[in-house]
Amino acid sequence: MSNHQNTYLKIIAECSFARTRVSNKQIIHFANVTPATVTETTRQLQAQGLVHRRRYTGVTLTEQGKAVAGQLLYAYRLCEVFCDQQLHLPLAQIPAQAWQMADALTPVTVRALAEYLDHPQRSPFGGLLDSTALPDDSHITRLSDVPVATTVTLTGYLETANLVAYVDHLDLPLNVPITITARDEELHLLYLQLPDDREVTVNALVATYLYTVPVMASVES
């Protein structure tokens, strides 16, 4: 497949996490392309047996598509770890740089990089690394869906430059308990309480791409 098609698979895989399906609008936004381009590329991916397209309701990965996307995400997140641990790049620069690096890796190089990095389990943004499958999202709840007065643990978020910069600006930590104290439906805001008594306000749309588990659930390191 072309890098262009790989990029679409990556976007679909990431955006489908904790969701039933991915809308064309989401793909248009994250790929920064026209609706016609999305239609044509997803049609090509469907012809290859990698996605199911549903008019008006969006796109889902087939089992074959999940396998291919899982390998893409694994190489990508290995590169994220490398950019973070070895190159010490600013967090917001890592997603784009890591994707460019991953595009050039052969399977042999991916295995060598995993060995060099001592087989990391998570990306700097909480994403799981699994060379055999996409991460299991059955226990994940989007922060936007968490009820008020509930305490959860933020385990990861969508790995795009803008979202990384947003979370970094808020200094929103992973793997610590956070409590949703209030919700403003009119302004589309969530209000969070952190263990250090900091109060953080999060855009509700952004919160759909922040992933949580119950506070008592174990979090893989």
Image (cartoon, rainbow, N blue to C red):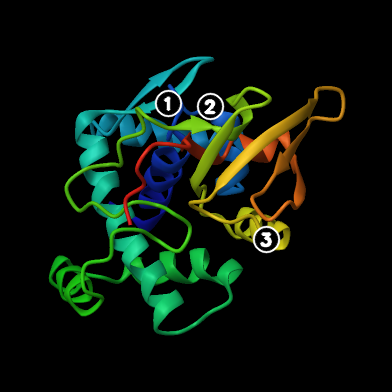
Considering only order in the chain, which callout, 2 or 3, is on the residue closer to the N terminus?
A: 2
The residue beneath circle 2 is: 23
Is any part of residue 37 visible from this angle? no
Residue 120 position by quadrant: bottom left
Residue 146 position by quadrant: top right
Q: Please, is residue 191 above or below residue 163 in the view?
A: above
Q: Please, is residue 89 above or below residue 47 in the view?
A: below
Considering only order in the chain, which callout, 2 or 1, is on the residue closer to the N terminus?
A: 2
For the residue marked with disc 2, what is the amino acid? Ser
* Residue placed furthest toward the bottom: 87
For the residue marked with disc 3, what is the amino acid? Asp
- Residue at image point 32% right, 50% down: 220
Residues at circles 1 and 3 in contact by the CB criterion of under 8 Å: no
For residue 85, side relative to residue 90 (left or right): left
Is any part of residue 189 visible from this angle? yes
Q: Nearer the viewer, residue 196 or 208?
A: 196
**Secondary structure found at label 2:** loop
Q: CA distance from mark 3 to mark 2?
A: 30 Å
Q: Please, is residue 131 above or below residue 86 in the view?
A: above
* Residue placed furthest toward the right: 186
**Secondary structure found at label 3:** loop
Considering only order in the chain, which callout, 3 or 1, is on the residue closer to the N terminus?
A: 1
Crowd tier of the residue under label 3, counting other residues whose Cα lies within 10 Å: few below 14, some 14–19, many 20 or above: few
For residue 192, side relative to residue 173 (left or right): right
Q: Nearer the viewer, residue 163 or 31?
A: 163
Numbered disc in front, either 3 or 2: 3
The residue beneath circle 3 is: 171
- Residue at image point 54% right, 15% down: 56
